[in-house]
Amino acid sequence: MMAMRATGGTDLLSRLPQVRGRISEGSPLSKVTWFRVGGPAEAMFKPADLADLQSFLAATPKDIPVTAIGVGSNLLVRDGGVDGVVLRLGGAFADIAVDGHEIEAGAAALDANVAKTAANHGLAGLEFLSGIPGTIGGALRMNAGAYGTETKDVLIWAEALDRDGVLHRIAAADMDFDYRHCGIPTEWTFVRARFRAEPGVEATIRARMAEIQESRSASQPIRSRTGGSTFRNPPGGKAWQTIDAAGCRGLKVGGAQVSEQHCNFLINTGDATGADLEELGEEVRRRVRESQGVELTWEIKRIGRAAE
């Protein structure tokens, strides 16, 4: 139950409905993002289940922002924190079930766990998810892809709640997918999805997943505090190549650095701020634009406000 009372001028918590899950004030988001930077959430809500989330959304005043985040693997939180409510889905949204040649998963299920479940049942086609360090909800929101496959290629349908708490089931064809993008309103919250797979040989599936992990380890700074791929690939090219050609490999701003191993990754070397990382990303964009006429677009989701 909600047990805290707001102490700031907005008195946010007093305007939120009673819930069965947990609402906390001032939760530090730096603890839940892979970059380990950023200010706090004005309030964080972890719903007990789908019904709890539905009633919360239906009763929350529409002028209060609600921002869903996953495990923070492709997220940059600014140092001033995030106003309104940050929504984090927990175990009630992380179930994975196999039905014939299809797999259904909650939005909080890790992509890698969905891939492992498929492998355990001899189902092929979802191995690429083992190379995406995030949740199903994030994969739906950005049409995540890796190693030649995107979410849109295997999705059957997704379910999402609108800001009134109404549940919508959306067929893959109606998701308006594009490269690292889906057209579902940003204020909707994904809660579940169903994917198609195909019969395969378990040993072959596991071998492919091992190849993906080996490739990631060899080419990406996966042991660093990073946010994954920083920029989308420009049309007909690779973001890392444009960054490298602009002389940005190893470039630093404060505690933030362009990875020497893969220069489409920014890393927190230990004491970076959200501002350091965002400034570094913008400097990379400027240099690429000026040297090659290429406009890089952020792939990392940036939320919140700058520190005052």
Image (cartoon, grey):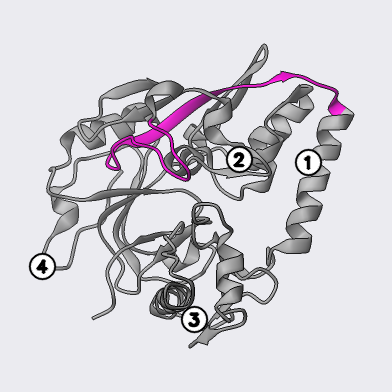
Q: Along the polypeptide, which appears first: circle 1 or circle 4?
A: 4
Q: Quadrant of the N terminus?
A: top left
Q: Which SS class for mark 4?
A: loop
Answer whether residue 264 is magenta in the image: no
Q: Which residue is labeled 2 in the image?
A: 111
- Rendering quarter of residue 188: top left
Give the magenta part as a residue range. Answer: 176-202
152 to 211, vertically: above or below: above
Mark 4 or 2: in front is 2
Q: Along the polypeptide, which appears first: circle 4 or circle 2?
A: 4
Instruction: Assess whether mark 2 and mark 4 are in contact (beta carbons under 8 angstroms).
Output: no
Measure the C-alpha gap from mark 3 to mark 2: 28 Å
Instruction: Assess whether mark 2 and mark 3 are in contact (beta carbons under 8 angstroms).
Output: no
Q: Farthest bottom residue?
A: 254
Identity of the residue drawn at 41% across and 76% down: 286
x%, y% of residue 218?
Answer: 78, 62
